[in-house]
Image (tube, helix red, strand yellow):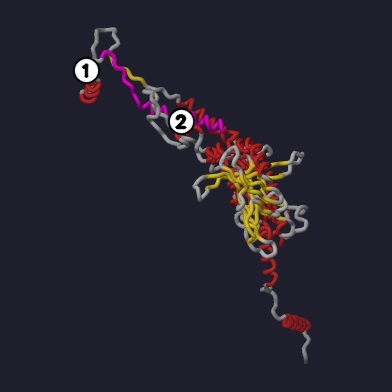
């Protein structure tokens, strides 16, 4: 892409990028327990008994409650704590794909779930390293701005990736703007938001001779030859909305009521005495008399006057606030579709009860899995193309996702045992609570069966000819025949 076209594209996509960045930034601040209640403290959650210049209400505690992280981590761990099992109906190809995916697939998907929950969509970047090995990594959502076609089924045409980098020579930061297509990537940089100083980064990529592998120079353009735009979206839902939109207001209400409660507890300890017709010289004498004599001097003009000492206190509506906190707490987990940890009951551990407890979370996670399956399938197809599989775009890709939840293993094992005679080996292995990888379990069963078949029968006669002689001797004994 030339300089003029890139400058226009940056301007046209700035507004959309700013909206995504704002939502992602707000979601990330709540994830790190920097709720709006802490804005006055620069994001720090802390108490302050003397924060306001008010004699009756001086406390200004600002403690945020980290519901957002709990709900997102529940979701990520529930659906992606274990890497899904990929099956393309070819055992050898399955092993090659597993090697390419490596050991980081589970942690990568977990991070993608967190990013998608924070921003609405997460992004996975795929590329070839210097040794031409296929690599993949998660890219922060605020760096990626996709460009789709306007079809009924949108196709990813290109990606704008923008991020900051430090110039080691000047010590200044500048923005790097990369434009990725299905064929190449072009790199630009600028320091101004207007892009008036936009220029190509001529030494961004090292170019190698394809035949000899020699370094032949540098360029601002790199031919990646992936055949597709090497960025894979992992959507949170159909509309690519973040989770915080569902319950941010409820968290803010809880923070407000909770901190108001704490403020009142601090303020109620500040008792203000109101003196009427005090007869002492000053307040220091009042404090001295009250401490030592346990009495104070008052000027009274007789019955009916209002001489005396009164106190100003703050009444705390404890019951009303407790009720509001409890209701808000429950609603956060209802609308956040999470598992309320205060509802866990040690005695009620049947399989049905556990499923009911996780039902709301299961609904949310099922939506995420549906969209993530599309992204993971695209990653597997890229790997198959890299492995030169001819039918990579048409081959069926089966995915088995494992939930990480509390379960009754004894009850599950009993079900598997009772149904094993009328259930296929594959489904029995999938339902076995001791099995994490059902494909590996079937392979182990086959190995055990083969090993058992090769072992001699301990009850078999090692000398079959001797067994025949013994049988003949028994027959002779019965008939009474002999050699005489």
Label 1: element kind: loop
Residue 299 sits above or below residue 266 on the image? above
Q: Which residue is rendered at x = 22% and y = 24% of the image? A: 288
Based on the picture, tell me whether residue 263 belongs to the magenta stretch: yes
Based on the picture, tell me whether residue 188 belongs to the magenta stretch: no
> Residue 40 location in percent, x, y?
46, 32
Mark 1 surroundings within 10 Å by alpha-carbon count, few (fewer than 14), some (14 through 19), many (20 or more): few
Quadrant of the snapshot with the C terminus: bottom right
Q: Is residue 87 left or right of residue 59?
A: right
Q: Is residue 320 left or right of residue 203?
A: left
Residue 418 sits above or below residue 142 on the image? below
Dot in front, 1 or 2:
1
- For this orientation, the residue located farthest to the bottom is 484
Q: Which numbered dot is residue 281?
A: 1
Characterize the magenta stretch by its predominant secondary structure: helix
Q: Which residue is mark 2?
A: 259
Q: CA distance from mark 1 to mark 2?
A: 40 Å
Give the magenta part as a residue range: 248-277
Question: Relative to the observer, which residue lies in front, 397 or 229?
Answer: 229
> Residue 411 location in percent, x, y?
62, 49
Q: Quadrant of residue 8?
A: top right
Mark 2 surroundings within 10 Å by alpha-carbon count, few (fewer than 14), some (14 through 19), many (20 or more): many
> Residue 244 location in percent, x, y?
58, 36
Question: Relative to the observer, which residue lies in front, 460 or 367?
Answer: 367
Q: Which residue is rendered at x = 31% and y = 20% of the image? A: 273
Sequence-earlier tag: 1 or 2: 2
Label 2: element kind: helix
Q: Which numbered dot is residue 56?
A: none
Residue 352 appears in the figure: no
Question: Relative to the observer, which residue lies in front, 308 or 89?
Answer: 89
């Amino acid at each position: 892409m030339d300089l003029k076209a890139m400058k226009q594209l940056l301007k046209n996509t700035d507004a959309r990028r700013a909206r995504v960045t704002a939502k992602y930034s707000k979601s990330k601040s709540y994830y790190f327990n920097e709720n709006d209640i802490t804005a006055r403290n620069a994001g720090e959650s802390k108490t302050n008994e003397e924060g306001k210049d008010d004699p009756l209400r001086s406390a200004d505690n600002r403690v945020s409650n980290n519901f957002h992280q709990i709900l997102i981590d529940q979701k990520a761990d529930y659906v992606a704590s274990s890497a899904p099992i990929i099956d393309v109906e070819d055992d050898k190809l399955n092993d090659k794909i597993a090697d390419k995916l490596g050991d980081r697939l589970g942690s990568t998907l977990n991070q993608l779930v967190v990013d998608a929950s924070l921003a609405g969509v997460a992004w996975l970047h795929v590329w070839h390293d210097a040794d031409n090995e296929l690599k993949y990594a998660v890219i922060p959502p605020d760096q990626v701005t996709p460009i789709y076609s306007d079809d009924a089924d949108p196709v990813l045409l290109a990606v704008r990736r923008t991020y900051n980098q430090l110039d080691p020579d000047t010590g200044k930061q500048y923005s790097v703007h990369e434009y990725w297509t299905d064929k190449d990537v072009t790199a630009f940089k600028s320091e101004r938001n207007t892009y008036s100083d936009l220029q190509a980064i001529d030494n961004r990529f090292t170019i190698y001779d394809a035949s000899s592998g020699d370094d032949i120079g540098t360029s601002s353009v790199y031919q990646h030859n992936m055949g597709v735009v090497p960025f894979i979206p992992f959507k949170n839902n159909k509309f690519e909305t973040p989770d915080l939109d569902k319950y941010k207001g409820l968290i803010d209400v809880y923070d407000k009521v909770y901190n108001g409660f704490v403020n009142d507890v601090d303020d109620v300890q500040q008792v203000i005495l109101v003196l009427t017709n005090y007869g002492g010289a000053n307040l220091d004498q009042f404090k001295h008399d009250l401490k030592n004599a346990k009495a104070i001097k008052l000027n009274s003009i007789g019955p009916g006057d209002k001489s005396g000492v009164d106190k100003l206190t703050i009444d705390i509506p404890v019951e009303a606030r407790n009720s509001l906190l409890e209701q808000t707490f429950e609603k956060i987990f209802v609308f956040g579709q999470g598992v309320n940890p205060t509802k866990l009951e040690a005695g009620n551990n049947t399989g049905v009860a556990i499923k009911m407890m996780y039902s709301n979370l299961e609904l949310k996670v099922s939506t995420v899995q549906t969209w993530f399956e599309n992204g993971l399938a695209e990653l597997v197809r890229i790997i198959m193309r890299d492995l030169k599989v001819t039918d990579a775009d048409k081959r069926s890709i089966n995915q088995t996702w494992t939930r990480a939840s509390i379960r009754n293993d004894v009850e599950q094992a009993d079900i598997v045992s009772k149904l094993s005679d009328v259930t296929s080996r594959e489904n029995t292995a999938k339902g076995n609570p001791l099995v994490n990888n059902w494909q590996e379990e079937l392979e182990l069963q086959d190995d055990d069966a083969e090993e058992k078949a090769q072992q001699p029968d301990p009850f078999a006669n090692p000398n079959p000819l001797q067994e025949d002689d013994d049988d003949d001797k028994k027959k002779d004994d019965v008939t009474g025949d002999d050699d005489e």
